[in-house]
Image (cartoon, rainbow, N blue to C red):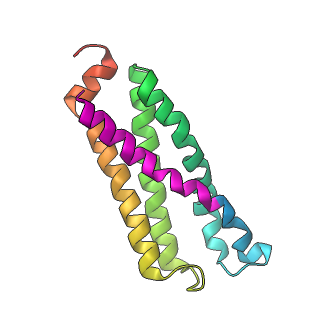
Amino acid sequence: MKPNIRWTIALLMGATIFRAQTILFLPELQMFGGIAPDGWFGPWLSDTIIGFAVLVMLYLFWTRRSMAVWGALVAYNAVGAFDYSQGLITQMISPMPVEMASAATVYVGIGLFMAAQIVALGLLFRRDVIAEFKGWC
């Protein structure tokens, strides 16, 4: 795998660490007395978990080579992209209050991060990347 591909995958995955900050949004849910629709509970909770997990996934990406690690990276990015799609659906069904973020900000932000994970996922399927995880180049 070329160094620029390695760095591109790492940066695309690493950019999604910002989803971990959604743990700070949980008190804003209506069930906790806040202004955000309760429909955001699932997306924010999964964002928090996936956001903290990126640190483990990046560690594995940089330090381990096996098909199990490659599979975990593929699964992580696929689940992450799917989770972002759930955020887009949640915004359509239970829009974020304007006091927290405009609809455009939510759609663009989630959309860009979802695209980053989809691109990282696509790069993991390059032959040279798979070959490195298989142990032969």
> Horizontal and vertical percent for residue 63?
45, 22
2 relative to 63 in the view: left or right? left
Residue 37 makes an appearance in the image: yes
Q: Main secondary structure of the magenta part?
A: helix
Please say whether residue 7 is one of the residues in the magenta stretch.
yes
Q: Is residue 125 above or below residue 26?
A: above
Q: Is residue 78 above or below residue 102?
A: above
> Horizontal and vertical percent for residue 75?
44, 39
54 relative to 1 in the view: left or right? right
Q: Residue at x 67, y 73 (%)?
A: 38
Q: Residue at x 36, y 63 (%)?
A: 112
Q: Residue at x 22, y 34 (%)?
A: 126
Q: Which image quadrant: the N terminus?
A: top left
Quadrant of the rendered image containing residue 131: top left
Q: Is residue 65 above or below residue 120?
A: above
> Horizontal and vertical percent for residue 62?
42, 27
Residue lying furthest top: 136
* Callout count: 0
Q: Residue at x 42, y 68 (%)?
A: 109
Q: Which residues are magenta?
A: 1-22
20 relative to 127 in the view: left or right? right
> Horizontal and vertical percent for residue 78?
41, 46
